[in-house]
Image (cartoon, grey):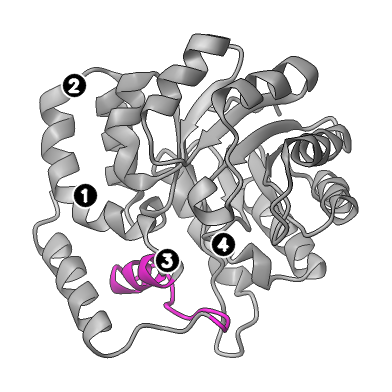
Amino acid sequence: MRLEWTGVMPAITTCFDENLQIDHEFTERHVKWLVENGCTAIVTNGSLGEGGALSITEKIALWKTVVAAVGDKVPVVAAIAAMTTADACAQAVEAAAAGCTGLMVLPPYVYRSDWRETKYHITEVCKATELSCMLYNNPVAYGTDFIPEQIAELAAEIPNLHAVKESSTDVRRVTAIRALLDDKLTILVGVDDCIVEGVNAGATGWIAGLVSAFPKESVDLYKYAMNGEADKARVLYEWFLPLLRLDTVPKFVQLIKLVQEKVGMGSARCRPPRMELVGQELADTLKIIDKAIAERP
């Protein structure tokens, strides 16, 4: 299956059962629901998917579940993140063997490498398979910032690097990358509350978080922005923004899982050290969620 890095691609959460094991039955139902609502790919075990809390055995099982669930309807993308280049390359090979169509490649965990080291890491991971790759640039979370000139350098030297997930929160990065590369790399918005601005700047895809709870609204918003339907986009965006902003804070995993639970499509359970919200933090979040559900378009 050819991977087109466009449309709304959910970075799904990983649902756990009462024993904090992956709930594969729910995962199958969830990804089918997302595809039925117009999502164009499924991105697994990324930051939102608590990839750092999953063993390689669990990741392989998750990939196989999602691949089997969506069949040939949409591609499945595996997030590749590790503390060593060797481990990351091994993950890439396993993802390909499990039937994934593409890779979302992250910089090394924990160690903040310099450009020479980072370039080597990304290049080796992309070379590990023939799968289409997307670079994940999230300096806020990982401390490694791929500036536009470095992204252009990678694009020139890695044949199967086809896209970049831009999560710097600076929409000017989209125009800067396009100025250097034009359409050589597809640019996807990687933070939820920047989708309309990102599309207006030239991005053509969205790796989204709140889509796991609100797929129809996410797909509609993306389409309005892409089609230049500014009034429709503005109305939907104004309703959606309080929820979308939950994707941009340290507890985004707990917050988005709570939203899923409130709409009846998931559980708030997380693996420690992440813990479910309590007290005033929970109360404040529920006000946001309840208001959004009550005023849902």
- At mark 3, the secondary structure is loop
Residues rendered magenta in the picture: 254-273
Q: Residues within 10 Å of mark 2 (few under 14, many from 20)?
A: few
Contact between labelled residues 4 and 2, with CB atoms less than 8 Å apart? no
Which comes sooner in the sequence, label 3 or label 2? 2
Look at label 3 and name its amino acid: Pro
Q: Magenta span has 255?
A: yes
- At mark 4, the secondary structure is loop
Residue 6 can be seen in this image: no
Residue at label 3?
A: 250
- At mark 2, the secondary structure is loop
Examine the image and state in which quarter residue 15 appears.
Answer: bottom right
Contact between labelled residues 3 and 4, with CB atoms less than 8 Å apart? no
Q: Residues within 10 Å of mark 3 (few under 14, many from 20)?
A: few
Q: Magenta span has 53?
A: no
Residue at label 4?
A: 49
Which comes sooner in the sequence, label 2 or label 4? 4
Looking at the image, residue 234 sits to the left or right of residue 148; the answer is left
Contact between labelled residues 1 and 2, with CB atoms less than 8 Å apart? no
Q: Residues within 10 Å of mark 1 (few under 14, many from 20)?
A: some
Residue 229, numbered circle? 2
